[in-house]
Amino acid sequence: MSKIILVLGGIRSGKSQFACQLADRLSQKVAVIVTCIPQDEEMKARIKEHRLKRPAHWQTIEAPKEIRPHLPEKEVILIDCLNIFISNLLLDGLTSATILEKISSLTEEINKKKGGWVIIVSNEVGSCLVPTNKLARVFTDLLGKANQIMANCANEVYLLVAGIPVKIKGNNV
């Protein structure tokens, strides 16, 4: 069974950088599953920034809408990020129930893996205001539930605040 580390934080909290540092400490055999679909120049720049911070020898797998079949046999798998994955599914018209089923089946697939680490990055939405837009409310509700599912099965959970990791579950890596 794989060990799961969930890394939560707000936008630009340092969660992806921290997750990369964790992955690098754990192994040189790392695969990064990225979920972002670049829609504009600003997002393309963010993606480029993330790529430049990762070691060049890490395998990168683009899986914006289906993570489960792309889980490779690596010592460390870094999924960056759950919030964009859920956003992609929501914008494709999937129901909340279907999306949560995908999250649950992803955790089942991760738990079937023999050994290694899976690091999952996600935005923490529990401290934000309730959005006035219905789609945004559906998204934050879904992401909050998905984070709870992941945190429940995770061995360790970190919350990044202003670039500082705060361990909120588990033993030291």
Image (cartoon, helix red, strand yellow):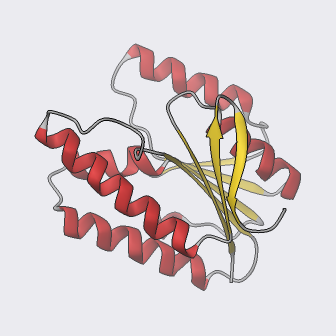
Classify residue 111 as left or right of residue 3: left
Q: Relative to the observer, which residue lies in front, 165 or 150? A: 165
Classify residue 126 as left or right of residue 34: left
List x then y, in percent, for residue 121. Answer: 57, 49
List x then y, in percent, for residue 37. Answer: 38, 36
| Residue positioned 57% across, 67% down in the render | 71
Q: Give the number of callouts.
A: 0
Give the answer, above or below, for where 143 lies relative to 136: below
List x then y, in percent, for residue 169. Answer: 67, 64
Give the answer, above or below, for where 52 lies relative to 92: above
Give the answer, above or below, for where 16 lies relative to 82: above
Q: Quadrant of the C terminus?
A: bottom right
| Residue positioned 43% across, 22% down in the render | 43
Give the answer, above or below, for where 108 lies relative to 140: below
| Residue positioned 46% across, 72% down in the render | 106
Confirm whether residue 1 shows in the render. Answer: yes
Q: Relative to the observer, which residue lies in front, 35 or 20? A: 20
In which quadrant of the rendered view does residue 144 lie?
bottom left
Classify residue 92 as left or right of residue 110: left
Classify residue 132 as left or right of residue 15: left
**Residue pushed farthest top?**
41
In which quadrant of the rendered view does residue 133 lie?
top left
List x then y, in percent, for residue 36. Answer: 43, 39
| Residue positioned 73% across, 66% down in the render | 74
